[in-house]
Image (cartoon, rainbow, N blue to C red):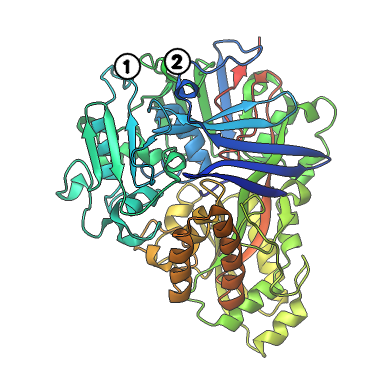
Amino acid sequence: MRHKLAVLSIGALGVAIAASGCTSTSSNNQTGPGTQHQQGVVSHDPNDSKGPAAPVAGATQGGTITVMFPSDFDHLDPTRSYTNINQVVGTLVTRSLTAYKEVPQADGTVKMTVVGDMATDTGTDVNKDCKVWKFTIKSGLKFEDGTPVTAADVGYGVARSFSPDLPEGPHYIQNWLVGTGSTSADYNKTYKGPYNGGADLPPGVTVDGSSITFTFPKAQCDMPFAGALPMTAAVPKAKDTKLDYDTKPVSDGPYIISEHTKDTSMTLSRNPNWDPNLDPVHHAYPDTIKFALNVDGDAINSRLIADQGDDQTALTWQNVTSEASAQVTGAVAQRVVDGATQFADYISINMQRVTDLNIRKALNTGLDKEAVLKSIGGDLAGTVENTIESPTTAGWQDYNIFGVGPNGDAAKAKAMLNGQTPTLVYCYADSARRHAMALAVQDSLQKAGFKITLKPLDAASYYTLIGKRDVPCDLYRDGWGSDWPSGTTIIPPLLDGRSIAPAGNVNWSYYNSDATNAEIDRISAETDSAQAAKDWAALDKKIMETDAPMIPTFNNRNYTLFGSKVGGAFLSSAYGATSLNNVFVKS
């Protein structure tokens, strides 16, 4: 899962395995002086999937919550949504087969359970071999216009996700249906969805009344997790506006998009046809949720620290900067969402353009990661890291392939270049925060013997732009967090060369190694999940040792503010950002 904000992952994650596959996770994550324990399980009790969601203590109905953010959303179409912020917003509008029920505990932990959202439960493993999964859609679910949500609408939503016109979202389920690698670009080689003459249901998907069944050629025991991805959202065929669906998807969640002025604002209003008794996850306390977009990051933090007027009912996903942190004391310090996330930051090296392994190794050797981290907040932004996997990943192992400290080694990198001065283009999202980071990268690498040209890209469409295979950049900052806490949702998406397509890529290094691809297949077929976790960690190290396709830079920490009249704000373990599911306006 991509992310659009600076958010710290530290600690270790252990995964408990049931006979049918990974069904629970547990993590002790150190955040500042305290310890945050995060855990998650897949519920096999249908009662957990029933609504309404348990009330939040002290919550009141009504009012308006405002979210201030420095850019617009990449995509609102659930098929194309693959950043954490898009998905946090998306869960309020379009529901998925399963979802994460997150309940903050008195000790500061968050109990996270995968439950049925549109579905009555987390799915039936029909033959007890993880190859056939059946979901039954709850009776009474309605779209915003009052028409019923059907299993056929879910099937059509999955079908349209095969379209080459909608390449940006996750492709696990599509590839599982086809039988290719979990992130292969060949998922739509034959069937390309209903826009291109295909049926309204993809091969492997059948609908019988209120039930939808997925039949996979290979065992896919993580289907309850994958069912929580937004591409399982119901889409009514009659209302499918294809590419324009990105502007205003049809709602079956608690809110509808009532206004969206690109790059300026968006407003969510109540969906009158949403039934809280059929929703175990959402509360929908505010009457309205407004998004103030393209607001300067420094201004956001200044306003939330000042806590005046309407800003008292506002929050942000923009991290507090190191400059502003001195003001986060006393009462202000009580208005912080702080904690570990699953996200890591990288500088990907475009291997289509930077073909010399020695140059890629010199980049890893010379980068001053601490200086880069300091440019966007230092300790408040995260901790320096050398691995591809985040430490929250099951089986994670630390290593230091290049033998340098957090400040890198400019002299060693220069020596590796043997008098060359490689000229490289570094692309970044055009915002004050990312510009500061770009300057730090440029300064560091130029000290190490490189000539770095900076190229800003539109912030709202940044991931769309770097996801195009012909992107005119050598280096670019990106971030990734596991879709669920397993190496299978990190290494294959980021580094399986068979996933590379003309657009919609998340293999931003455009890395394609036959040896790595073969090992991805081998580990993906591993039935012992604990062994697979160790193998993903070993492959992580091998990739950096052999090919160095990226520069792992730091793990991310969430340290964000909310106003004094905002209640129910907490850090989502599923998305690594402040959740909107429990927020309310205090009396």
Q: How many marks?
A: 2
Answer above or below: position of 450 versus 142.
below
Q: Amino acid at mark 1?
A: Gly
Judge by depth and name the residue closer to the eye, 516 or 291.
516
Answer above or below: position of 493 versus 414.
above
Q: Name which quarter of the figure residue 428 lies in.
A: bottom right
Q: Please tell me which residue is depicted at 58% across the width and 54% down the height of the picture.
A: 530
Residue 238: mark in rendering = none
Q: Position of residue 252 (x, y in %)?
A: 36, 24
Q: Is residue 422 left or right of residue 73?
A: right
User: How crowded is the residue under tag 1: few (<14 C-alpha within 10 Å), some, or many (20+)?
Assistant: some
CB-based contact (under 8 Å), mark 2 and mark 1: no
Which secondary structure, mark 2? helix
Task: Answer whether residue 477 is visible to the viewer in this image.
Answer: no
Q: Which residue is mark 1?
A: 140
Q: Which residue is mark 2?
A: 276
User: How crowded is the residue under tag 2: few (<14 C-alpha within 10 Å), some, or many (20+)?
Assistant: some
Residue projecting furthest to the bottom: 418
Position of the C terminus by quadrant: top right
Which secondary structure, mark 1? loop
Answer above or below: position of 201 versus 208.
below
State the CA–CA distance, disc 2 to disc 1: 11 Å
Answer above or below: position of 279 versus 520.
above
